[in-house]
Amino acid sequence: MSETASKKRSEKLGDKNDLRIKAIENGTVIDHITPGQALTVLNILRVSESFTNTVSVVMNAGGSRGDKDVVKIEGRELTEKEVDAISLISPKATVNIIRDFEVVQKRKINKPDTVCGIVKCINPNCITNSSEPIETRFIVTDDEKVKSLVLRCVFCESVMTEDLIKYIE
Ligand SMILES: [Zn+2]
């Protein structure tokens, strides 16, 4: 697609998106979520039926096959831990803080070097899975071969890759 055509297309989509989602007054817009991962993001943010604020979810924005998911959450800003957890499943996501209808902060998510207390260790015999009050800690690296993040437990050296979504606490 040429640059002009793609610009026209995104303008058109912009109009349509306005109909789909109202602007929010205060809260957070998580944009450029990997397609299909919006529900995992809601899980990370502990959004369930008991959550009473307005939450808008767009999956596969930009057409039937879509190139991103978007989550808008009213009256809620994200903790560092939540941002780190999202980075593990959606490394290209951006977090926009909205106050009084204005974007006051827009940040790209960076892959953290370590993640603590976010992912459960895959090894049932790991000390973090015992009754000891020890928080999980993993070193995060990229693996070009498997094209996914690799987490290595600092306590038991267990390595976790593509299945790590299942282990987010
Ligand atoms: Zn471990």
Image (spheres, rainbow, N blue to C red):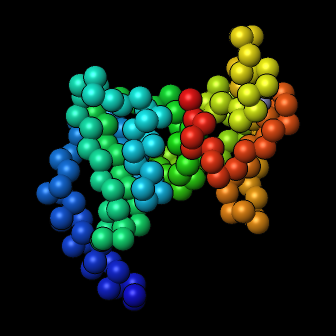
Image coordinates of residue 143 in percent, x first then y, are: 76, 58
Splitting the image into four quadrants, where does ligand 1 fall? top right
Specify the farthest residue to the left: 19
Q: Quadrant of the N terminus?
A: bottom left
| Residue 120: quadrant of the picture | top right
Between 13 and 167, the one lying in front of the other is: 167
The answer to whether residue 98 is visible is no
Residue 49 can be seen in this image? yes
| Quadrant of the image occupied by residue 112 | top right
Please name the residue shown 18% across and 64% down the image: 16
Q: In this image, 1 relative to 15: left or right?
A: right
The one nearer the camera, 91 or 102, is 91
> Could you tell me which residue is drawn at 75 percent across and 10 percent down?
132
Q: Looking at the image, which residue is at 79% across and 25% down? A: 125
**In this view, 64 is above or below 53:** below
Pick the quarter of the image with the C terminus: top right
Furthest residue in direction front, as rendered: 124
In the rendered view, tell whether residue 138 sits above or below residue 61: above
Front in this rendered view, residue 166 or 8: 166
Q: Position of residue 67 (x, y in %)?
A: 41, 66
Residue 99 point in image, percent of width and height: 31, 34
- Residue 113, compared with residue 120, is above or below; it is below
